[in-house]
Image (spheres, grey):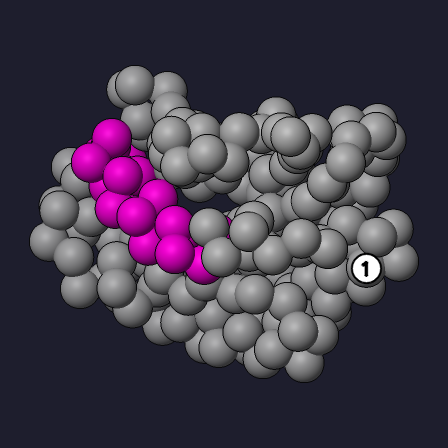
Amino acid sequence: MITDLRVCFIGDSFVAGVGDAEHRGWVARLCARSTGAGLPLTAYNLGVRRETSVDVLARWEAECRPRLSVGDDRRIVVGVGVNDTALEGGTPRVPAERSVTALAALLDGAVAAGWPVLVVGPPPIADDGQNARIAALDVRFAEICSARDVPYVSVTGPLGASDPWRRQVAEGDGAHPGAAGYQELADLVWPEWEAWLRTRP
């Protein structure tokens, strides 16, 4: 019997797949591969450009609840952090401690609603200073998820060492890759994602 699996992907422009001329990003690539692996699902892409963890915290439940009101298996994937670390007026848009608090509140709310969560960490961009802040936040996010037994996929290091990712980001807008970069990101997320989906709540 096929399970009615529904997943909300909520987060920023990387979740939305900005920069991909194929308009698939990593989310659609991941979902297509899932169907091929016998894990069909209904996916809702709720990525919004420029949003921070605080922005996502403010809207996640209102957007996810109607989409996850029914179904045999209902889940959430979160991707935030890059916009938190961008400088405005010489300081990060969201202080690291507040970013961590926002993610923790979202995770606790999802657990209370009975929706398992997978978190995908923030990817690097073409700015060494911001990448240092992204890497530091990545560590904090991983700690928060570990404390709550929530699976976390850290992509900062692997993508930072990837020539295709760095080249596409540099050739684009300085933050987002093209199709090949998003394929790399989907490939990094896949092992944890597949294991997570095959573990029924």
Is 15 within the magenta?
Answer: no
- Asked if one can make out residue 99 in the rendered structure from this viewpoint, the answer is yes
Going by the image, does 134 lie left or right of 169? right
**Residue at point 33% right, 54% down?**
188
In the figure, residue 144 lies in which quadrant?
Answer: bottom right
- Asked if one can make out residue 55 in the rendered structure from this viewpoint, the answer is no
Quickly name the residue at label 1. 111
Q: Amino acid at mark 1?
A: Val
Q: Nearer the viewer, residue 3 or 81?
A: 3
Percent of width and height locating residue 55: 70, 46
Query: In the rendered view, would you say 50 is above or below 16?
Result: below
Q: Nearer the viewer, residue 23 or 85?
A: 23
**Residue at point 57% right, 71% down?**
141
Give the residues drawn in magenta, as a range.
172-193
Is 186 within the magenta?
Answer: yes
Give the dominant element type of the magenta stretch: helix, strand or loop. Answer: helix
In the figure, residue 105 lies in which quadrant?
Answer: bottom right
Q: Residue furthest front?
A: 1
